[in-house]
Structures are given as C-alpha cells and as structure tokens.
Image: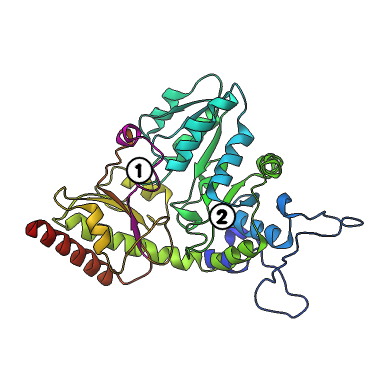
Amino acid sequence: MNTNKKGINTICTHEGELEDKLFKGAISPLYMSTSYEFDDVDVKRYPRYFNTPNQEALCKKLAALEHAEAALIFGSGMAAVSTALMTFLQAGDHIVLQQTIYGGTYNFAVTQFEKFGISYSFTNGWEVADFEREIQPNTKVIYIETPSNPLLTITDVKGVANLAKKKGILSMIDNTFASPINQTPIDLGIDVIIHSATKYMGGHSDICAGVVAASKENMDKVFRTGICFGGSLSDYTVWLLERSLKTMALRVKAQNENAMKMATYLEQSDNVDNVYYPGLINHPGHEIAKSQMKGFGGMLSFELNPNIDASLFFKELQLIKPSMSLAGIESTMLSPTKTSHALMSPEDRAKQGIKDSLIRFSLGIEETEDLIADIEQAIAKVKSMTVTA
C-alpha cells in the first residue's frame, strides 16, 4: 500500500515499526548496542552511521510523514540544520536566507559561513520577490522557515520552490513550527526539509533531536556529511521519539484548535496590542497559509500593552509555564529576546520586528478556559502592582 495513501494517524502509529519477533510485544523493541557484527552481514551497523535497528526504523517513519524518499535523525535541530547546510554549500558559494528565521540558524549563518568562504544574504521580507532580488550567480541554496519563529510570518512555499527550480538552486525549509501534520513541503516542490524534532515530533519536552528529509539522492549527500560531523542520536532517545510520533497527529490537531481559540481571545483583549497567528483573517499571510497548510499550527506570539511589564507577567503565571523551547503538551510562554533570539543583536532583532515586549506562546492540550483564566489573573496582578507602586 502506498504510504501517502494511508491516514496520518496510521502512518504515525505503524510506519517504521520494528517487530518484536522474540516476545511479540505491541511496541518496537529497543536495541541499545553500540557494537554490531561486521563479518558476513549485509549492513555494518554503527550509531554514527545512522543505521542501528531503531535509527533505521525511525527514519522510515519520518520519511513517510514528510512524503520523502529518505530521512535521517540527528542529535538536535541545529545538528540537522548545520549538517544540511554544509552538505550543499562549499567555499565560493552563496546562500539566500529568509529574514525571519530561528535565532540559532541566524547565528550559525553570521558566525560560521564566512570562515568557510561561504557568502550569504538575508531577504528584506518573505515575499518571493524578496528572495529573487538576493539571488547571485553563485547562489546554491535558498533557505526558508514558515511559519517563522517567533513572528509567525508566512512564506509562499510553492512560489519559492518554483523560483529555486527555475534558477537551478536547491530549496530548503525549516518545517518545525508547522510539523508534517500541518504542512508537507515536498508536495509543494521543496528539496530538503528540516525539523527540530525536539518540538512537535517529540511533543513531551523530554528529548532533543533533529530531522532532515529529502530525495534519496540528496539524503545520500547529507549522510556523507553527517557521518563526518557525528551528530547521531542515542537509541534510547530514538525509541522515545518513535513512541512520541505515534500520537503526534492527535496532539498537533488539539494544539491547532487551542491556538486558534487563544489567538481570537488575545486579539479581542484590551491588554494586548498585537497578535501574530496565521489563522487570524487579518494576518498578512492568512490566505497563503490557508492554501499550503492543513492547520495553522499550535504556535502564536503577542505583544502586551506597554503599561504591562512582560517580565512581571511571566512571574505571575500559575498554569502556563514560563519555559524555554516549545510544542510540548503543556502550554508555555517565553521572551524571544531572552531565549530563542538572544544571540542576535538588538539591532538585528529590531530589523525582524522582534520587540522586548513580544511573548511567544506555545499551546498545549489544556482547556482554553483555564489558560484564559491564568492569563487574566496574571495581568490583573501586574496591573495591581503598578497601581500600588
């Protein structure tokens, strides 16, 4: 049966399973060995070669979820990003990167590319024309992220993919915020897909991992770079990630619904100046998001009124966790200027529109009524402090 024809929950649950042939257990067995037989075997297995039994099986599930021919799992999202980028770039090459991207990726570009003789340009926006303006004769890669971290900007995935193909350039996307439940970029023409699997794929705030998925030809190239960089993942974490992926579709769909409800609530609140969520009709990328996403995602960001101190607001939250990272089943908030984008200079953050008052909100699976009550009590306490002062 064609994997792409299977239901998403079926793929999450059954694709890439390992059969327990000894005891007939219902879940994949865990093979913890780091040393395997080398003589008279079809595959010489070694963790750094991404081919232990658990690694190999998980990669099949990840490829199926992204409608890709192959995938590899890495020790972190940044291990996946850096390995993918350095696979397709070399001295003398140029890359065009979207202006609004994850702070770690931005930091990698500005601190690492020049030492390898790689030049780069950031766009002034996220329209297709913004990318075309930055293309140079030696441009080899276009890199996008949509929805973007932390402002949830939306890029026309198919438009950028078509531009890259027309120019003979490789296209690459960070698909973390969408997850393969909401967006499958290969179907839109993108060449290489990257994830921080720490986020929606893991979904329980207890593992760190990264994913790269693409055609077999491109993944063979990523593999050759990956075995040199050594960013492999322990089999126990691989096993945990395979477990987590079984419920990903259920979790993400619940988070989508919660994010839409909370974005609507925040948009109507007198205590909030701006809300960034592609599911809102007034979001500038709403129509594009609707055309390329199956759901608008579980992430949003917002700015409190200037008279409400964001630092004090975090301290007064009782249910929502002021916590780094995102996409767990518990709702979390953070300040991008202090966490995900702290490595960027204040000037560079300002160019992206990231204000100190910006709060990134990762929706979990709780009842939204409880989340709203928590936000309102926290704001009320901060306001009372201001009046008392």
Magenta residue span: 331-350
Residue at position x 7%, y 58% in the image:
387
- Please provide percent x and percent y for residue 324: 40, 55
Question: Between residues 84 and 389, which one lies in front from this camera angle?
Answer: 389
Picture coordinates of residue 176 (x, y %)? 47, 51
Residue in the image at 48% along x and 40% along y: 105
Check disc 2 and report the residue beneath it: 209
Question: The residue under label 2 is which amino acid type?
Answer: Ala
The amino acid sitting under disc 1 is: Thr
Asked whether 28 falls inside the magenta stretch, the response is no
Residue 202 image offset from top left, x and y in percent? 52, 61
**In the figure, 388 relative to 220: above or below?**
below
Name the front one of labels 2 and 1. Answer: 2
Tell which residue pokes out farthest to the right in this image: 40
Q: What is the secondary structure assignment of the residue under circle 2?
A: loop
Place residue 220 in its image quadrant.
Answer: top right
The residue under the point 59% across, 66% down is 240
Quarter in which the C terminus is drawn: bottom left
The residue at the point 67 percent across, 67 percent down is: 17
- Which residue corresponds to mark 1? 153
Q: Quick one: which residue is furthest to the left in this view?
A: 387
Of mark 2 and mark 1, the one earlier in the sequence is 1
Q: Is residue 336 left or right of residue 66?
A: left
Report if residue 341 lies within the magenta region: yes
> Quick check: can you spot residue 94?
no
357, above or below 125, in the image: below
Label 2–label 1 contact, CB within 8 A? no
- State the separation of the CA atoms marked 2 and 1: 24 Å
